[in-house]
Amino acid sequence: MKQKGGCSMNKLTTLIIACFVFLFTACGESEYEYSSIPCRLAFDNAIHNNATLASGMNQLSPGIFVRIRITDVNPRYFEFSNNQGLTEKSIFNAIDDRLEPILGMKNGLIVGFGNLDSKFRAYDAQCPNCSDANAAIMHDHSLTMTTDGHATCSTCHRSYNMNNRGMIDKGDNGKSLIRYHAATSGPYGILNVN
């Protein structure tokens, strides 16, 4: 069966499979850069119009990072706080409820564009060196963000550079920040983390 342009269906199928194989093997060791801890967030900022979240989803403002949390009370809210001191909430809508977001280990996510390479990243807001993802009880080892794009742990006193893939830049050696796959279509577009 021929498609428009003279490409047979078998060649098209082979091309698609080859692209998938390339995508999954070309990354090499980068598959280990991302966490397998459950995390799922799809947030439409075109509907919510949250300016604080938009500040971290703006590629023209690298170095601004936004912590995302969910309040446990009814009605539920998304709470957004950036490393420049702004905080804002957005109430859950029916779509948010249906999508059932999971924000990593315990303390939410941190998202933003790094100012070294302008890549959009999502980090777990829990210290990776003080926390055990397999623990029955998750203790609070929340990270505090600084205006210059660092996240610090008050327990172990490590400092992680969010502009540089969440690597430790002060304190004892250890693991870098837990990272999740993340994408944004712009400040007032879609945020996807998984």
Image: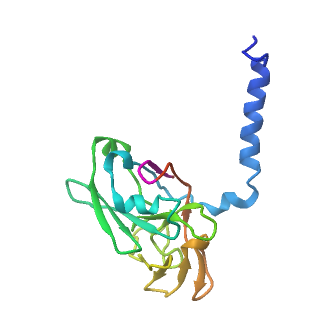
- Picture layout, residue 77 above or below residue 87: above
- 19 or 64: nearer the viewer: 64
How many numbered discs sit on the rendered protein?
Answer: 0
Residue at image coords 60%, 83% = 169
Residue 115, percent from left and from top: 58, 70
Residue 190 is a magenta residue? yes
Query: In the displayed image of the protein, which residue is found farthest to the left?
Result: 74
Query: In the displayed image of the protein, which residue is found farthest to the top?
Result: 1
Residue 100, percent from left and from top: 36, 47
Residues in magenta?
Answer: 187-193
Q: Quadrant of the N terminus?
A: top right
Query: In the displayed image of the protein, which residue is found farthest to the front?
Result: 60
- 33 or 48: nearer the viewer: 48
Please identify the quarter of the rendering in which residue 30 is found.
bottom right
Residue 64, percent from left and from top: 47, 69
Residue 102 is a magenta residue? no
Residue at image coords 59%, 80% = 168
State left or right for residue 83 relative to residue 71. right
State left or right for residue 105 relative to residue 161. left
State left or right for residue 126 relative to residue 25. left
Residue at image coords 62%, 71% = 116
Residue 75, percent from left and from top: 20, 53
